[in-house]
Amino acid sequence: MNIRPLADRVLVKPAAAEEKTVSGIIIPDSAKEKPLKGDVIAVGNGTKDEEMVVKEGDKVLYGKYAGTEIEIDGEKYLIMRQSDILAIFA
């Protein structure tokens, strides 16, 4: 994939939604909660006021309504500002 976010934007691949069953009932995809974590795929160069703290390969937590969902080659990604990321974890 050849995509590079601009300024303080970050491209994140969301983690797969977890399968949950309740007493043998499978929850449909439309009712699953969006994952709130993912892997950083690409980062912009930052701005003169804000340097980039996250880097490619980081695992991050982000807010429920963070970012814009995009689809590239059949895969879903989120593009968001670095400030929408809440934490980096191992």
Image (spheres, rainbow, N blue to C red):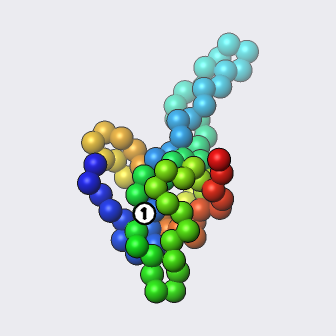
Left or right: 50 as drawn, with respect to 61: left
| Image point (59%, 53%), residue name | 60
* Secondary structure under the numbered disc 1 in the rendered image: strand
* Nearest the eye: 53 or 21: 53
Asked whether the viewer can see residue 63, the reply is: no
Q: Percent from the top left, x then y, of residue 27?
A: 60, 25
Q: Percent from the top left, x then y, of residue 11?
A: 43, 57
Q: Percent from the top left, x then y, of residue 75?
A: 36, 41
The residue to which callout 1 is attached is 43
Residue 7, located in which quarter of the rendered image? Answer: bottom left
* Nearest the eye: 36 or 26: 36
**In the image, is residue 81 above or below residue 63?**
below
* Nearest the eye: 53 or 67: 53
Asked whether the viewer can see residue 58, the reply is: yes
Name the outermost residue toward the top.
24
At label 1, the amino acid type is: Val
